[in-house]
């Protein structure tokens, strides 16, 4: 505990670094995966290719990815951009299948009905399909958020600062308190992100909450 | 007036849903397309607002070929009510009703005010306006569906088995409401159902379809009942089995109507509508 108090400044700084590295990949991953997922949902011939590619990307080992990105992108090896791009690739890989499933799950009746009352294709996407895919997209995003916050620690191996530094340094010094501090920090960030996502979901998708409540009540009454 | 002129529809898989269908649907009255599944009735309905485009023939609305109209604009000026309401689950009742006018550029406040009036029209309490569809009963959802269909004050209202999924009591209620609304608004309604009783109740013109969109008979309910064109129609309307061949049985001291199967169908009364409590089998007003 004394160590934590004595090093609070560093813990706080690395926590902020960690957050700064985690947020862009989550947002970018979402922005890239949603259109890809929609294409996979809408155009059957592309579905296999997109989903397989997503699955393959996720199997690339993190270190290999971080070391090869500077060569591909022409960035410096210590540039945090490498971590952001790498994490974005993982986020897309994780989310693209969920996004395709989310659009698949939109009821055909509702889609038909939106066509029948005069929605054109663009407004139908933004005002009907995207919000109705929202609950499934949100659950996918929660997984991506937790996974990104934990994977960002790998960046420390190539010298990009995050709470992962405490793992490496604690290991070198055989100092469990430091490692434990890193773990707690990562968990706290992950939980806070998750709560934020749930809160955003409540605000943007109030109807989903209502529908779930009703379903639960219905099941309760049937039992 | 809506006119089908030699309309055919072959789906990409090669199946022929409708073959050379010709029919005139007069304005300001209700035409019911009735047939079993596979009769092409829903396909025919969806051709009117170009949800489905025919592969042969043409459809005109007041003389305009629909194929030459922009489908999205066409759909916005035709009301559409479907089974399971088709309401947008993420929009409140009022937003669902005001949906099409807002798509069309009407100001939100104006569209909402009109939507509240429409809730009155379809017999829904205004207090439901802020609920989501999932918070309503099936019958209430269908009423919202009808209100949405009426929101742009369309000349034409297309109804695709709108009361097919609600329980019989609610269905009776909704049918009577529709008759009342139609008396007030006189829309051109095209209604699809597989229920011949519903067809006879609601239709000024009833079109009985065979498989493949072939017209077995078209006419008023009375014409069809009195002179079924053939065996198929007779069996479809139930005349053959005697379900509609009623006779008076006075043995019970009262004048009771009995059908050909021996089932008591109702009580004979002196005037239309009958007395309260004896209306079980009596004709609607």
Image (cartoon, rainbow, N blue to C red):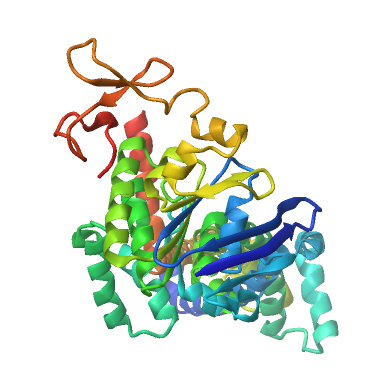
Residue at (20, 58) in percent of width and height: B125
- Furthest residue toward left: B276
Numbered disc total: 0
Front residue of this view, candidates B179 and B222:
B222
- Residue B45: x and y, percent? 56, 59
Give the quarter of the figure containing the C terminus of chain B. top left
- Residue B181: x and y, percent? 29, 59
Residue at (14, 34) in percent of width and height: B276
Q: Is residue A143 visible?
A: no
Q: Is B156 displayed left or right of A85 in the figure? A: left
Front residue of this view, candidates B265 and A115:
B265
Q: Is B270 displayed left or right of B40 in the figure? A: left
Does residue B237 lie above or below B161 as drawn? above
- Furthest residue toward top: B251
Front residue of this view, candidates B214 and B249:
B249
- Residue B98: x and y, percent? 35, 72
Front residue of this view, candidates A143 and A189:
A143
- Residue B212: x and y, percent? 69, 48
> Residue B234 is drawn in which quadrant?
top right
Residue at (80, 79) in percent of width and height: A69
Q: Is residue A73 visible?
A: yes
Residue at (42, 74) in percent of width and height: B100
> Residue A37 is drawn in which quadrant?
bottom right
Does residue B131 lie above or below B95 as drawn? above
């Amino acid at each position: 505990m004394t160590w934590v108090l004595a090093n609070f400044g560093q813990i706080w700084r690395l926590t902020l670094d960690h957050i700064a590295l985690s947020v862009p990949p989550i947002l970018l991953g979402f922005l890239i995966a949603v259109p890809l997922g929609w294409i996979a949902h809408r155009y059957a011939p592309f579905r296999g290719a997109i989903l397989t590619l997503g699955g393959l990307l996720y199997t690339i080992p993190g270190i290999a990815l971080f070391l090869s990105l500077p060569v591909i992108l022409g960035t410096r090896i210590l540039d945090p951009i490498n971590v952001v791009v790498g994490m974005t690739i993982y986020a897309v890989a994780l989310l693209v299948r969920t996004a395709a499933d989310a659009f698949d799950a939109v009821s055909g009746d509702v889609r038909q009905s939106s066509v029948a009352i005069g929605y054109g294709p663009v407004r139908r996407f933004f005002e009907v399909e995207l919000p109705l895919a929202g609950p499934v997209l949100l659950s996918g995003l929660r997984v991506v958020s937790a996974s990104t916050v934990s994977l960002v620690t790998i960046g420390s191996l190539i010298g990009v600062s995050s709470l992962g530094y405490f793992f490496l340094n604690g290991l070198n010094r055989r100092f469990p308190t430091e490692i434990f501090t890193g773990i707690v920090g990562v968990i706290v960030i992950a939980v806070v992100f998750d709560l934020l996502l749930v809160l955003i979901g409540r605000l943007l998708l109030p109807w989903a909450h209502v529908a779930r409540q009703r379903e639960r009540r219905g099941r309760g009454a049937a039992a | 007036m809506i006119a089908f002129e030699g309309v055919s529809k072959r789906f990409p898989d090669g199946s022929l849903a409708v073959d050379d269908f010709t029919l005139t649907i007069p304005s300001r009255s209700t035409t019911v397309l009735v047939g079993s599944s596979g009769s092409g009735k829903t396909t025919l309905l969806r051709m009117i607002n170009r949800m489905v485009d025919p592969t042969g023939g043409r459809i005109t609305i007041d003389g305009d070929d629909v194929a030459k109209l922009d489908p999205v604009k066409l759909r916005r000026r035709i009301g559409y009510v479907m089974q399971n309401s088709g309401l947008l689950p993420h929009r409140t009742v009022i937003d669902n009703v005001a949906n099409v006018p807002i798509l069309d550029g009407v100001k939100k406040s104006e569209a909402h005010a009109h939507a509240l009036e429409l809730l009155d029209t379809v017999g829904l309490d205004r207090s439901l306006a802020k609920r989501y569809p999932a918070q309503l009963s099936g019958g209430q959802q269908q009423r919202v569906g009808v209100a949405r269909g009426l929101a742009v004050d369309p000349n034409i209202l297309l109804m695709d088995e709108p009361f097919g999924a609600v329980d019989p009591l609610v269905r009776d209620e909704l049918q009577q409401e529709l008759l009342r609304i139609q008396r007030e608004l006189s829309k051109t309604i095209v209604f699809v159902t597989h229920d011949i009783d519903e067809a006879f109740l609601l239709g000024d013109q009833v079109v009985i379809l065979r498989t493949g969109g072939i017209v077995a008979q078209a006419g008023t309910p009375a014409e069809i009942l009195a002179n079924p064109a053939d065996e198929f129609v007779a069996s479809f309307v139930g005349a053959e089995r005697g379900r509609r061949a009623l006779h008076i049985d006075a043995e019970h001291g009262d004048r009771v109507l009995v059908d050909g199967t021996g089932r008591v169908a109702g009580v004979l009364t002196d005037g239309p509508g009958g007395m309260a409590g004896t209306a079980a089998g009596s004709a609607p007003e």
